[in-house]
Image: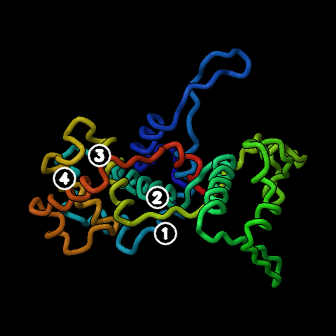
Amino acid sequence: MPLKEDDPKMKYVFDYCEKHFSCLMPDDFTGELIVTYSTIADKYMYYYDDIVVTLPKHFNEAEYNKFDILQQQIGNLNLDKQAFWGFIVFLYYSVNIYFKYKTISYSSKIKEINQFIKQSISSDNKLKVTLTSGRKKIEITDSVLITAILSALNSPENYWQDIMVKGLHGEPVIGYTTDPIKLKNLDYAWKEPEKTTERKKSYWVIRLMLQYFFPDSGNVINYPQDISVLCLCVLHLCGFLLGQEHIVCDKDNIITLRKLLTDFDGTTINLRNIETKFGL
């Protein structure tokens, strides 16, 4: 059953989404700027039950409630127990879907492919083009033939913008129309698998949590002991930090957190991309 708006688990999620995903948009009739709120929080409420069943084995509310070291840090830092649970699940899911695949515009992908072809065909690297249709396959390695069949190599830089296309997989491209549209106006984005590691995901769960709860309590690497131990507990709960909790979630293991924060310091993510992927 979906969560309700007044569920304590949603307290921090609503606040976070309002701060990071709302924006000012002109009113269609008056032109005045109004605050437009994201649908992420609504999607999270709706999909909550589906999300929690996908969490790692020991990442569940029962384990969370009996995680004494974590609960002690939550109390020490005056955090809301139920709201913190809802927020950590939200962050874990958000980071995982963010790194599930990367989304770029069709124009960027076309430019990337064309650049690869031009660089490869003019170098000593052997470029091969493979065309398949059912069980039939043609492989082309001759540079003259490749140049001939790939007309893009002899076209203006933005040749693709006026190509007429229809919606992907039979879907309408704008509103409810299925009429062809110029590729430059296509709203769809190209999706492809994103290569990342569990360690990088763990960094962003912790980094986003620190930025939200404790923006002025430390620097990018060093935080007070209570906050640092809280981070270790969250890493352990999420399955990122293995071992006995009384050992890995101890103040003597804070160096593990600092190493994680150091290794990925300077990396960035675009929070807006979470919005495009949430609930998909």
Q: Which of marks 1 and 2 is nearer the N terminus?
A: 1
Mark 4 residue element: helix
Q: Residue 228 carries which label?
A: 4
- For mark 3, what is the residue? 210
Residue lying farthest to the left in this orientation: 252
Tag 1 and tag 2, C-beta contact below 8 Å:
yes
Real-space Cα separation, disc 1 to disc 2, in angstroms: 9 Å
Q: Which mark is residue 54?
A: 1
Q: In this view, does 24 lie above or below 8?
A: above
Q: Where is residue 225 in the image (x, y as percent from the top left)?
A: 12, 50
Q: Earlier in the sequence, mark 1 or mark 3?
A: 1
Quick one: label 1, few (<14), some, or many (20+) residues within 10 Å? few
Q: Which of marks 2 and 3 is nearer the N terminus?
A: 2
Q: Position of residue 278 (x, y in %)?
A: 56, 52
Tag 4 and tag 1, C-beta contact below 8 Å:
no
Amino acid, disc 3: Leu
